Amino acid sequence: MAKQLIFYEKVVPIVLDRHREWSVEQGASYDFAAGANSCPLMVSEFQMAAVDIPIVFGKNETGIAPMAILGIEPKKSVFVGEDGVWGKSYIPAFIRRYPFVFAQAPEQDTFALCIDEQFDGCHEDGKKGEKLFKDDDQPTDYLNTQMEFAKNFEIEQRRTVAFCELMEEHKLLDPTNAQITMPDGQKRALTGFHVISKERLKALPEDVVKDLFERDALELIYYHLASIRNMERLRDLTG
């Protein structure tokens, strides 16, 4: 879980006894994501993300998964400024969800909404941001909203896994790397990711293409392919 969660540090379930007075100041600063040059992406985000961000596929513990490339330099996002403000581009749901996340209880089929207590926007005294619980100990509208967001994220995660399995089934993914020439002439290399092969896509039988179209997978493929041009944008934004 730690590898997939990237910038999460101390993830604990949200419980009344522990978090009764807690509040969360979310969205004021994205400093927590400044050191991430990539993050997971859901297929439902492809259309919006493809405008600004390269979408590739990376390997994790469970298989192939879509990734948003956020920077060329290791451990540096080009979208987070020194003031912690996210630049004028799409913010992936993985980042908008933070510091909340669903986690599965060990050896159980139940999930609990958790929070990263190390997040700078967490306040134990409840004096800043949005409270997690009301005075009558019921969840606030804010907490219910975060719960719904996390639930939807898990639903989209399943859809994303199904899309990736489809890509692997038809052997459309190729390992590749990007060689980028910076404005000062220095070379940078991004490695360890996969992209969909145009040649293999064109060679697919007609019935397979029709099936991909009917599943809306073909649309997602084209968003991915179009997004690769944003590698040049990352280069231009790299300070």
Image (spheres, grey):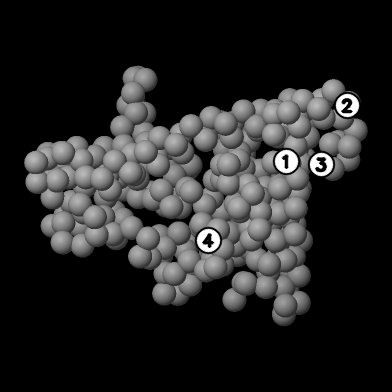
Callout 1: SS: helix
Asked if the residue under mark 2 is in contact with the one under mark 4, i.e. CB atoms within 8 Å, the reply is no
Find disc 2 in the rendering and name its residue: 206
Q: CA distance from mark 1 to mark 2?
A: 16 Å
Type of amino acid at the residue the image marks with label 3: Ser
Residue 208 lies left or right of residue 124; in this view the side is: right
Res 140 label = none
Q: Quadrant of the N terminus?
A: top left
The residue carrying pointer 1 sits among few (fewer than 14), some (14 to 19) or many (20 or more) residues within 10 Å by Cα, namely some
Mark closest to the chain's N terminus, 3 or 2 = 3
Asked if the residue under mark 1 is in contact with the one under mark 3, i.e. CB atoms within 8 Å, the reply is no
Q: Nearer the viewer, residue 56 or 6?
A: 56
Residue sticking out furthest to the left: 136
Horizontal and vertical percent position of residue 81? 48, 72
Residue, x 81% and y 27% (percent of image)? 210
Mark closest to the chain's N terminus, 3 or 1 = 3
Find disc 4 in the rendering and name its residue: 75
Residue, x 48% and y 61% (percent of image)? 35
Find disc 1 in the rendering and name its residue: 219
Q: CA distance from mark 3 to mark 4?
A: 28 Å
Type of amino acid at the residue the image marks with label 2: Glu
Res 197 label = 3
Callout 4: SS: loop
Mark closest to the chain's N terminus, 1 or 2 = 2
Instruction: Say which of marks 4 and 2 sits in front.
Output: 2
